[in-house]
Image (cartoon, rainbow, N blue to C red):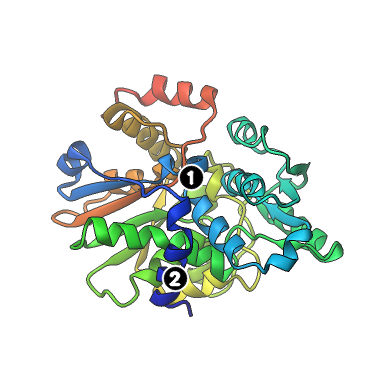
């Protein structure tokens, strides 16, 4: 199991290369929920999401002699942007695998980088499997989006900042896809019995929730969700599954309409863009009475959203709240 010391070490490894994102009080969310609500603004992180934390920590763990090898990654978008940024920053050769239906906003975010881009697979599970086999075939270095201790510890550094910015808190809500972020947060807060870590998933792609409930990793959902960054399933023997099963305090499962309303809410009241996955914790808070009287932190994870989808959401739900 990952220790707090490993997460703290990760923070020392990367703190000079990342943004210390702000923790912003939300008057409107606090009023509606009855909680004292803060937003951890990771959508303003380098490359537009929290993913750079894990990637940088992984890169810093690799021996200098291995930098002549090809680095390999797979992603629906945000891990891809972090990997592409790191390839320029550390000057390594990169092969980047993306699902065939990667969103336009996330493709635009990596166009300027020199990594080789390969579109493969109907979902992130297929894409990740292809990247893993490719890395083995070429004796490359795999930079996995979540199933890696260094990646998990890097994502957990968000917890280090939250604790420094709000020493007394009760709950952290964050999205779950493969589980790297939520696992890192669980690891960091594991000895603090006053803090609950809650994972937020779309109802149409709730593989981690279903896996924990069933006692084994389930197959990827075949349903569509606008929360593309958290969709696609969990690979077998994932470290994150075991961490979530043992350490996660609970889940919030969110319907598609609630996700859209949450995106519109953040645009309206905080004048900042968030992608649908990033809005999952906001939707959870807006649709639950469980946090009344608590000090709650919502981790906003990314901001890459297609213009057409954003326009549709704002037209439909811009005045809902």
Q: From the viewer's perspective, tell me whether residue 19 is left or right of residue 55.
A: left
Residue at the (37%, 70%) spot, across then down: 188
Q: Nearer the viewer, residue 184 or 279?
A: 184
Foreground: disc 2 or disc 1: 2
Q: Quadrant of the C terminus?
A: top left
Q: Are marks 2 and 1 in contact (CB under 8 Å)?
A: no
x%, y% of residue 314?
Answer: 40, 23
Q: Secondary structure at mark 1?
A: loop
Q: Does 320 sit above or below residue 205? A: above
Front in this rendered view, residue 250 or 171 = 171
Answer left or right for 139 relative to 216. right
In this figure, which residue is indicated by the disc labeled 1?
49
Residue at 56% across, 72% down: 239
Which residue is more in the foreground, 120 or 260? Answer: 120
Q: Which mark is residue 102?
A: none
Q: Is residue 300 above or below residue 242?
A: above
- The numbered mark, 2 or 1, whose residue comes first in the sequence reads 2
The residue positioned farthest toward the bottom in the image shown: 1
* Image quadrant in which you'd find residue 140: bottom right
Vertical order, 190 against 128 (above or below): below
Q: Which residue is mark 2?
A: 9
The residue drawn where x is 36% and y is 31% is 272
Count of marks placed on residues: 2
Q: Residues under labels 2 and 1: Cα distance?
A: 21 Å
Q: Can residue 34 be seen from the camera position used here?
A: yes
Q: Secondary structure at mark 2?
A: helix
Q: Quadrant of residue 72?
A: bottom right
Q: Is residue 135 left or right of residue 317?
A: right
- Vertical side of 315 occupied by 110: above or below: below
Q: Is residue 209 visible?
A: no
């Amino acid at each position: 199991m990952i220790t707090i010391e490993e997460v703290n070490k990760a923070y020392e490894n990367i703190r000079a290369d990342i943004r210390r994102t702000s923790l912003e009080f939300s008057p409107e969310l606090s009023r509606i929920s009855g909680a004292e609500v803060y937003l951890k603004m990771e959508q303003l992180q380098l490359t537009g999401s929290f993913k750079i934390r894990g990637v940088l920590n992984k890169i810093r763990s690799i021996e200098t002699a291995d930098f002549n090898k090809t680095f390999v990654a797979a992603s629906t978008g945000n891990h891809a942007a972090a990997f592409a940024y790191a390839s320029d920053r550390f000057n390594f050769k990169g092969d980047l695998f993306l699902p065939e239906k990667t969103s336009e906003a996330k493709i635009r975010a990596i166009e300027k980088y020199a990594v080789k881009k390969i579109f493969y697979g109907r979902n992130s599970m297929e894409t990740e499997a292809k990247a893993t086999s490719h890395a083995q075939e070429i004796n490359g270095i795999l930079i996995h989006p979540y199933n890696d201790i260094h990646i998990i510890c890097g994502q957990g550094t968000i917890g280090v900042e939250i604790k420094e910015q709000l020493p007394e808190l009760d709950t952290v809500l964050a999205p779950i896809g493969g589980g790297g972020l939520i696992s890192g947060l669980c690891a960091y807060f594991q000895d603090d019995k006053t803090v609950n870590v809650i994972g937020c998933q779309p109802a149409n792609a709730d593989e981690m929730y279903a896996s924990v409930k069933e006692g084994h990793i389930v197959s990827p959902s075949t349903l569509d969700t606008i929360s593309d960054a958290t969709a696609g399933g969990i690979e077998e023997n994932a470290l994150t599954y075991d961490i979530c099963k043992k350490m996660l305090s609970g889940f919030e499962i969110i319907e598609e309409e609630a996700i859209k309303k949450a995106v519109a809410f953040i645009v309206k009241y905080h004048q900042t863009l968030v992608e649908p996955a990033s809005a999952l914790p906001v939707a959870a808070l807006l649709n639950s009475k469980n946090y009344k009287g608590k000090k709650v932190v919502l981790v906003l994870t990314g901001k890459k959203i297609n213009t057409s989808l954003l326009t549709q959401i704002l037209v439909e739900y811009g005045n809902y709240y």
